[in-house]
Amino acid sequence: MLEQVLAALVGIFFAASIYLILSKAIIRMLLGVTILGNGVNLLIFTLGRVSREVPPIVSNGELQPAAGFANPLPQALILTAIVIGFAMFTFLLVLGYRAYQELDADNTDTMRVAEPKDAPRPPLSY
Amino acid sequence: MATTAHTIDPGDLPRAMLDIATSLNDWVIILPIVLCLMGGAFLLLVREWRGAQLGLTLVFLAAIAALEAQLFVRVLTDGPIAMTMGNWLPPFGITFAVDVLGAGFALAATIATIVVVISYSADTMQREVRYGFYSLIMLLLAGVTGAFLTGDLFNLYVWFEVMLIASFGLMIIGGRKIQLDGAVKYGFLNFLATTFFLIGLGYLYGLIGTLNMADIARVASQTNSPAMIAVAGLFLLAFGMKAAAFPLNAWLPASYHTPDAAISALFGGLLTKVGAYALLRTMVLMMPAAREVLDPVITTIAVATLLLGPMGAMAQTNLRRAVGFIVIGGIGSVMAGIAISGLFGVAGGGLYAIHSMLTMTALYLVAGMIEQVTGTDDIRRMGGIYRASSGLSILFLVLVFASAGLPPFLGFWPKLLLLQGALLDNDGLLVAAILINSLFTSIAGARIWAHVFWRNGREGEAPNAINPDLKPVAAAVKRPTIFASAVLVALILFLGLRPNILLESAQIAAVGLVHPDRYTAAVNLEVPDK
Amino acid sequence: MASDLDLSFTLVALAPFIAALMAPYIFRFLKEYSSWALAIIPAAIFIFLLSFLPEIAEHKTVSAGFAWITALGVDLNFYLDGLSLTFGLLISGIGTFIVLYSGAYLKGHAHQGRFFAFILMFMGSMLGLVMADNLIALFTFWELTSITSFLLIGFDHSREASRRAAIQALVVTGGGGLSLLAGFALLNLITQHWNMTDMFAFAPALKQSEFYLPVLLFVLGGAFAKSAQFPLHFWLPNAMEAPTPVSAYLHSATMVKAGVYLLARMAPILGGTELWSTILPIFGGITLLWGATFALKQTDLKQMLAQTTVASLGLMVMLIGIFNEAAIIGVVLYLLAHAFYKGAMFMIAGGVDHSAGTRDITMLGGLARKMPVTFIATILAAAGMAGFPLTVAFLAKEEIYGALVETDVLTLFSQPQNLIAALVILVGNALMMAVGLAVLIKVFLGRQKPTAEHAHENSFSFWVGPAVLGILAVLAGVMTAFMGHNFVAPVASHIINQEVEAHLHLGFDIVTKPAFVLSLLTWVLGTLVFLVIDRIRVDLASLVERANISFDKIFDWLMFGLVRLSDAITRFLHHGRLEIYLTLVFLMFAAVFFGPLFLMQVDWQPLQMPQLHFYEWSTIAIAVAGLAAVLAARTRLQAIVSLGIQGFSVAILFLLYGAPDLSFTQFMVETLSVVILALVMTRLHLDQADIRGVSDRMRDGSVAFISGLGVTALMLLVLQGNLDMRLTDLFAATSVALAHGHNIVNVILVDYRGLDTLGEISVVMTAGIAILALIRIRSGGRQTGIGALKPEPRKAPK
């Protein structure tokens, strides 16, 4: 039943991160991105089934890990995902920083250069 | 859970490795990606040697294209081939599996990249080169190619991320305000799309415990349990977003017009098609039963995308934004192919994606030339190109009719397959949407044509007024740009007139996806005896 | 295995296209002589096709061509029978004169080379269309005629009216073409063939099948749009914005007849059913009356002719619908007659315009003496238009009336259908005759108007076409036996799929035939209408004025309505507000979970009270508290610390459940994130507090809540099953033995799944480059303010 509790925790992580990502303020959105990454990692971890305390390491002199060892594959996947997620986070952070500098706004509501609010209407002629 | 024996005689080990080493011939599968990555790293190393960057990039790209062409011909004649890294038996190691679909997409992507690199060569600014412009291009191609050639779903995710981060870099190179704004939207929305992919992967692994595509196809192709449907739904969401299908395509028109036109061309040609490719792989090859359940959803997406794409193009005054919406309309055709599935649908959808890679790249390049010649990106302030340049006029017109899917241009053939597939399915809505998409795209193209080419002056001015900003083409556009675009359009024209090889390949690819026996056989799965 | 025949046909089909490509260059060298050089192409094709006449007259057919797309079974093949030969001869023959005429008409025009290119390309497409046997090839040429027509109508591109007419034509005929494509695709699915000659055998079965109706409607949609049948007729008069040679060639003699051609060509497959004989005459009849009536309203010569063209097309569609032997013979004769006299008439109108400077019939008069040759040509053409004896149109009319009248005119009264048809045709013909007379008499006879003062006879190229066509209009009416044997019988036989004996002759017994009464009535009515044509014109014009509605207006309304609708939808969907885009994304995300879980039958297993240790509960509680603190943070420091708390809790969870590697990495990454965030946050003087209003928070909170709930729900469902541990078991068994690593996670990363790690490194490297570029490349004043258009040239957008 361990996994079910973690599943609930993952849901909370997701809810919190989504609430932050929707917050219009880039810096809060970035907090959301970090939390979302954690949530996803926990999700993969939990879905790979969880056991207590036995790391997937073969002791010296043994050929196989001790019984009840944790599933190593999700761990490997998560390690990859953590690093990638961190790279993404850093880029988005710097992007947000530069956007704040150039566009003078932290509010996505007012960042409307690419799609201006008063974009001209299409010409009604041939 | 795991086996409990503490000591095992190596002779009792389960079969884990291939008995024979991967033949040299099969290493060619991974070589394009390795070359891309090596190229990217190498170009970064010699980034101060600016004069050589372009030449080196082209050498790498040419080698990659040659390898992929050879690969394409080989899978076309011999069927799919696969190799697994480290000689581990699939599904234990990461398999690279190439069929006609993957090889064809990879080749088309490389061709589009070469065209873009050549056409941009004269305009690239020095500092952009110094900050790794060509490296980013190679890394983007690495991500794209990796996605097309891999046979492992998690590995596909990794290549998606390589592609995504490289596209971030290319999106903001230049550093204009509009680019940063576009990149913020592009960045967050695409980050979410790949995250959804990762979430889907997590669930899928939790459900069936494997990541190898052929293995997933073996285990899950007949499953349509609620959980599997939800996983398929996550993939549809993630890849649909990457492919810019309705309703989650806002990132494309928000960002594609912001970087330089050559970058737009590269993105328009490559990125959305990776999403389309992943949809074909997952929905048709791996989870056909789940796709069947999701069919109404996919059909709705396809119809909406088919109609709203060209309608968006009609509503734009920014030329490249309009082109962006035409790209979206094309994605509707690919979605229609997935909705139809079956041999007609898959062949049509796949071929349309190939057509779209070439045509949309060219369309963005031509749009970029128009912007250079007219000095604006506003359709209403353009005008007079028809008088000024027959060449540009021909290029644009061919591309418009190609994207509308009128014969004898390239876009027609996949449209024909899709139409027949939809008719066979008795899906009147889809038939209508496919046809109306062609009509609307023609209207959108003809409107742009009338305003930008036929009209002499600007919008609202007297008929005889001449556009004062119009520069001579030869002065405004660099020669490599004209040359590369013209060659690409000539290729599109040629393939439209002689589509046999493409159609045959598409049919073979479709058979390979709908009946994946040869694909799974090539992967050489180690199947547990039950 | 290309035989000589295949080769020569292919060459003939390609020749106009090659000539079109070369036309601009030829024009550059030969200038005003280029029309003479280029006219050789259609003339040569005409002669080539003429050489098949004896063979075709014997009811033989010629097939040639080669495989085009084997993957789809599509051939580029040509099929010559009476129908295609007749059309081919018209296209190449009239084309020769049109090319000559264009040279004179557009003398001095800068883009004459372009014009020749388009018109030759059109000619090639049209020839291909009528000779193609394969439906895909036919459709390809069909769309090419639409495209070339688009370019030709918009040739005078600086005027908005031309652009509008061009787009209108493209939309209507292109849209019709798509309907046609659907019909063709369906036919292929039913018969498994693309060649029409292979489809004939399926005709009886097809007419019985449920697919007959959709196929027929799709094909009619295409044919009606192309041949300007009501209510899709309006584009044709507008197409007169094109230079006159185009009007004469495309929009009268050839392209608009493609629809008629297609109906005739497909008649053996689709024709003769009750549906066919109902739809075609009704639409054709309405079109005939509509066009003929509106022709009276016009003052512009070209408009008058265009409206009568609409009427004539209606008549031809009607006749094909009636589908008896006489009607088909009538349609063949009428087709020829119309091509002759209407082609001539258009070229005459252009000549008059060129000479007198106007095409307005109220401003013209008394040109006969100034333009004697044109006048004579006009007499011949008008005689054809009126259907006077000795012209081929007369023969046509006799056949047409004969098709409706069996023994006696009085029998009509017992057949209401035929009576209505006869009346419609009679009125239509009479009105067209009035228009023909008006062109002849108002323009050339009577008092000289001021416009005639400077008028003069045009050059040879201007009048040779009308003269020859005018003579042909009469000659064909006299050489009845030749026409009957070589054209009428072969064409008609094909259309109704039975041997037809052409019984044309020039005896005076025609007069004694019952149908002759109807001809007489036509002439009487036509003359009467002509006498009051000026009044009718004024009355009609004011009527239309008062109605204040026209198909043109409806088209504009639809077109701009579509643009406005697109604008509204696009603004609604692509508003530029990231937070709304994101909300939609997460709504879809939630739907992905709730769709399957709610709509499908799910077996939920009951949850048990979890047995967790205290420290596990604490870690989880701390993580949740950390999350809550991030959400509630009001200061920079609070937010950062809270972020750290949830991150480290996750790391501890990893540690607790056997993932030390993950735990360490998580610690490091989390620390780095916090540090970088702190750095950035201190440089940006930002407020961490939530800037959203209450309603926004409610909305976002609900989206977040249902998404989280969905994620958890699906996890619980997935966790109910057993995980297949094949991969893990093998990794455990072989990690030490084969891969020589004790830490299985590491072995996976570097060995089993080493490629992932390669990709991961690439991501990090790429991120580095991207971030460097982001920081180092600054725009140096290349951009403008938020939301502004870019008036100043920006850095050359590549």
Image (tube, rainbow, N blue to C red):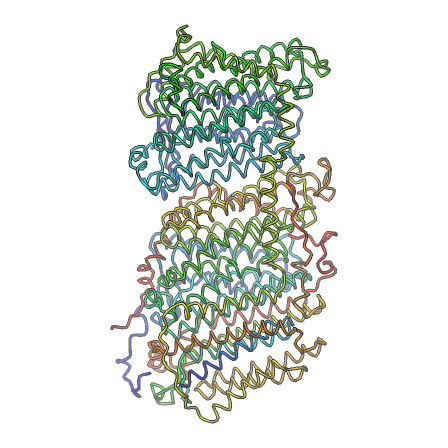
C58 w.r.t. C641: above or below: above
Q: Position of residue C662 (x, y in %)?
A: 48, 82
Please identify the quarter of the rendering in which residue B93 is found: bottom left
Q: Nearer the viewer, residue B56 or B228?
A: B228
Left or right of B357 in this view: C452: right
Q: Can you name the residue that lies furthest to the left here? A: B530
Q: Quadrant of the C terminus of chain A?
A: top right
Q: Nearer the viewer, residue C185 or C398?
A: C398
Q: Can you name the residue that lies furthest to the top here? A: C508
Q: Confirm whether residue C6 shows in the render.
A: yes
Please identify the quarter of the rendering in which residue C8 is found: top left
Q: Can you name the residue that lies furthest to the bottom here? A: C614
A41 w.r.t. B168: above or below: below
Q: Quadrant of the N terminus of chain A?
A: bottom left
Q: Confirm whether residue B505 shows in the render.
A: no
Residue at horizontal 51 percent and vertical 91 percent from the top: C618
Q: Position of residue B158 (x, y in %)?
A: 48, 69
C598 w.r.t. B434: above or below: below
B509 w.r.t. B489: above or below: below
Q: Position of residue C101 (x, y in %)?
A: 59, 20
Left or right of C525 in this view: C198: left
Q: Nearer the viewer, residue C408 or A74?
A: C408
Left or right of C285 in this view: C452: right
Q: Position of residue B246 (x, y in %)?
A: 51, 58
Label tally? 0
